[in-house]
Image (tube, grey):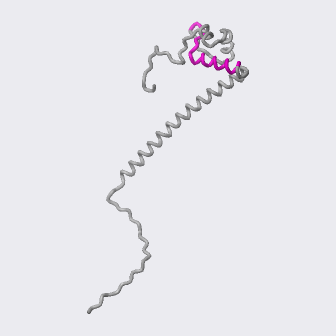
Amino acid sequence: MEGRRRNPYELTDESPVYVISVAAQLSGLHPQTLRQYDRLGLVSPDRTAGRGRRYSARDIELLRQVQQLSQDEGINLAGIKRIIELENQVAALSARVAELQAVVDGAAAAMQQREAQVHASYRRDLVPYAEAQQTALVVWRPKRKD
């Protein structure tokens, strides 16, 4: 959506719209568990002016992921926090790689364009000269006068 203005009323996965009770219901967790995860830094919802928590759809998905890692995989909360940090780091690095790839592609295109300009500027009235290497022996015989 580069170059386009976004509608300020458009809801995205990152729009903080759910209060803690709704987020708890949607994630299948107790509201106190959500508060604990917030204190530990596992899931950090946005805050309203009155300091109330507002969760986004992405936060709720993250809450479900934390619960799945904790309950099904048996990973402790410190391990889950590290996993989340590493996943965020991988996402940031992937975005950076894509950004650098775009820069490299742009530089390659500019280089090809400049190369084409140089080739177009060659003088066409000049002929390349390559010295011929002759290895043949020529024998000259004068014509007879009869």
Q: Nearer the viewer, residue 55 or 123?
A: 55
Identify the residue shown where x is 62% and y is 13%. 27
Does residue 56 appear left or right of residue 131 in this picture? right
- Where residue 40 sits: x, y (%)? 69, 17
Q: Quadrant of the C terminus?
A: bottom left
Q: Quadrant of residue 139?
A: bottom left
Does residue 11 appear left or right of residue 89 in this picture? left
- Where residue 87 sits: x, y (%)? 63, 27
- Where residue 16 sits: x, y (%)? 55, 14
Query: For the magenta stretch, what is the residue range?
Result: 49-71
- Where residue 49 sits: x, y (%)? 56, 8
Q: Quadrant of the N terminus?
A: top left
Question: Can residue 84 be found in the magenta stretch?
Answer: no
Identify the residue shown where x is 45% and y is 27%. 2
11 shown above or below 137:
above
Main SS of the magenta part reads helix
75 shown above or below 116:
above
| Number of marks present in the image shown | 0
Identify the residue shown where x is 27% and y is 91%. 145
Question: Can residue 63 be found in the magenta stretch?
Answer: yes
Residue at the limit of the structure toward the left, as seen here: 146
Identify the residue shown where x is 54% and y is 11%. 17
Residue at the limit of the structure toward the bottom, as seen here: 146
Q: Nearer the viewer, residue 110 or 86?
A: 86
